[in-house]
């Protein structure tokens, strides 16, 4: 399992972001809150590499094998990173980025334990889809949270 | 032999697992009709400005125009739209690296936030904007303006004023698009014009306006905003690989310029 912790000086910023994000989550479920804290935990090291991690987030719950699409307006010239996480031990999930024609558009993606990641440097400005999927889970429903960041 | 067979079997199992985990190269997006409507990631203004940074050195001071304060009115829909345009001005002032204007805009944000009952949630941001503008920490100021927009949004959602929050976002988008089209017009290129390819956002704002309460929809300014979006939509809803021509950029600039002027017109 990947485990990263924010540096002390970043922790307050992280907590503010987390607090802000919790209120804006479309689905207000406690387990999504936990998933979100994991997603920010995974994203935080990238903030130190110059990525701006958005203070709002998206979340919900899915059964194993279910997918959900999150639609995004992305701009050519920026690099984007997406972090997906769950609080369910033993669950496996993934996130992949597709363009408006449904073609896989990410430059890299991975999944490790409760985390999944995808990055994209869009070839064109326009609409993209982050497809969130729970591959397997010991639970009937698996809470997930998605955050993203960008840099020029 | 048994060992070799076990190794091969393990490799075969791992290979099939890897294949199963590999994402499809092509998917049918019509599988997700309802989900995609509900879950839209609206970009923060910094995302657009980050790209603009790379496209030469536009005359941001000219985009900013003369200093002006926008007092609150009794019309909350107008104040919400106005607040959005003022926050967008903040980004332009950051690009112009004009710390005095940034500070003035920060104070104006506070006044308008008070008019729509969310002053408390942006006080810290406003103070931070002033402090960071003094230190000329422009990236940090940008982040604070992004944050101010999100704080206002959040506070309004908490006050069950989500529709006003949507008007703040719309006001910001309209003013941002006005400035963006001016910059693109200044020195037209396909790359610059491509930034306007935002069909998803226009559809999203359209849906939000259509779902607003009858009282808000009857507001003449909100009606004008809906009409403006109705005009801009067909202009940018091109296929991703088509160019947005210079004349379209000029037309979008005219539409957004007119609506921003209406939003900023003094009462009476």
Image (cartoon, rainbow, N blue to C red):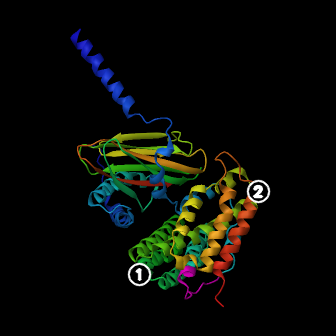
Residue found at x 55% / y 88% = B74
State the mark number for residue B246. Answer: 2
Quadrant hosting residue B78: bottom right
Nearer to the camera, A87 or B99: A87
SS type, badge 1: helix
Nearer to the camera, A4 or B241: B241
Disc 1 and disc 2 in contact, CB within 8 angstroms: no
Q: Alpha-carbon neighbours of circle 2 within 10 Å: few (<14), some, or many (≥20)?
A: some
* In the rendered image, the vertical position of residue A69 relative to residue A10, given as above or below: above
Whether residue A50 is visible, yes or no, is no
Whether residue B200 is visible, yes or no, is yes
Specify the quadrant that holds the C terminus of chain B: bottom right
Residue found at x 53% / y 73% = B168
State the mark number for residue B120. Answer: 1
Instruction: Pinpoint residue B109: horizontal percent, then vertical percent.
Output: 52, 79
Q: Chain of mark 1?
A: B
SS type, badge 2: helix
Question: In screen coordinates, is A140 left or right of A78?
Answer: left
């Amino acid at each position: 399992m990947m485990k990263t912790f924010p540096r002390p000086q970043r922790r307050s910023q992280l907590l503010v972001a987390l607090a802000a994000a919790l209120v804006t989550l479309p689905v207000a479920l406690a387990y999504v809150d936990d998933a979100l804290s994991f997603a920010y935990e995974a994203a935080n090291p990238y903030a130190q590499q110059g990525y701006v991690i958005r203070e709002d987030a998206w979340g919900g719950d899915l059964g194993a094998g279910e997918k959900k699409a999150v639609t995004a307006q992305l701009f050519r010239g920026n690099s984007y990173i997406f972090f997906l996480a769950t609080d369910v031990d033993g669950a496996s999930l993934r996130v992949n980025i597709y363009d408006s024609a449904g073609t896989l558009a990410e430059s890299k993606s991975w999944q490790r334990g409760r985390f999944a990641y995808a990055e994209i440097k869009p070839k064109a400005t326009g609409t993209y889809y982050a497809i969130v999927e729970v591959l397997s889970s010991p639970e009937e429903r698996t809470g997930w949270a998605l955050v993203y960041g960008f840099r020029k | 032999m048994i060992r070799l067979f076990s190794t091969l079997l393990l490799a075969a199992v791992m290979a099939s697992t890897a294949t199963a985990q590999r994402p499809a190269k092509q998917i049918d997006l019509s599988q997700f009709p309802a989900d995609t409507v509900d879950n839209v990631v609206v970009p923060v203004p910094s995302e657009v400005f980050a790209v603009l940074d790379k496209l030469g050195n536009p005359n941001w001071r000219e985009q900013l125009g003369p200093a002006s304060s926008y007092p609150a009115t009794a019309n909350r829909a107008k104040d919400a739209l106005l607040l959005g345009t003022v926050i967008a001005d903040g980004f332009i002032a950051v690009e112009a690296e004009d710390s005095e204007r940034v500070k003035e805009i920060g104070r104006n944000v506070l006044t308008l936030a008070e008019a729509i009952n969310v002053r408390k949630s942006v006080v810290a941001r406003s103070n931070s904007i002033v402090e960071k503008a003094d230190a000329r920490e422009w990236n940090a100021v940008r982040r604070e303006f992004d944050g101010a927009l999100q704080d206002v949004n959040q506070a309004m959602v908490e006050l069950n004023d989500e529709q006003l929050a949507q008007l703040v976002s719309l006001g910001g988008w309209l003013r941002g698009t006005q400035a963006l089209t001016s910059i693109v017009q200044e020195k037209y290129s396909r790359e610059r014009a491509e930034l306007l390819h935002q069909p998803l956002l226009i559809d999203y704002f359209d849906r939000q306006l259509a779902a607003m309460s009858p009282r808000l929809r009857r507001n003449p300014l909100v009606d004008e905003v809906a009409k403006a979006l109705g005009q801009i939509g067909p202009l940018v809803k091109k296929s991703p690989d088509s160019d947005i021509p210079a004349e379209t950029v000029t037309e979008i600039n005219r539409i957004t310029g007119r609506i921003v002027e209406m939003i900023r017109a003094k009462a009476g």
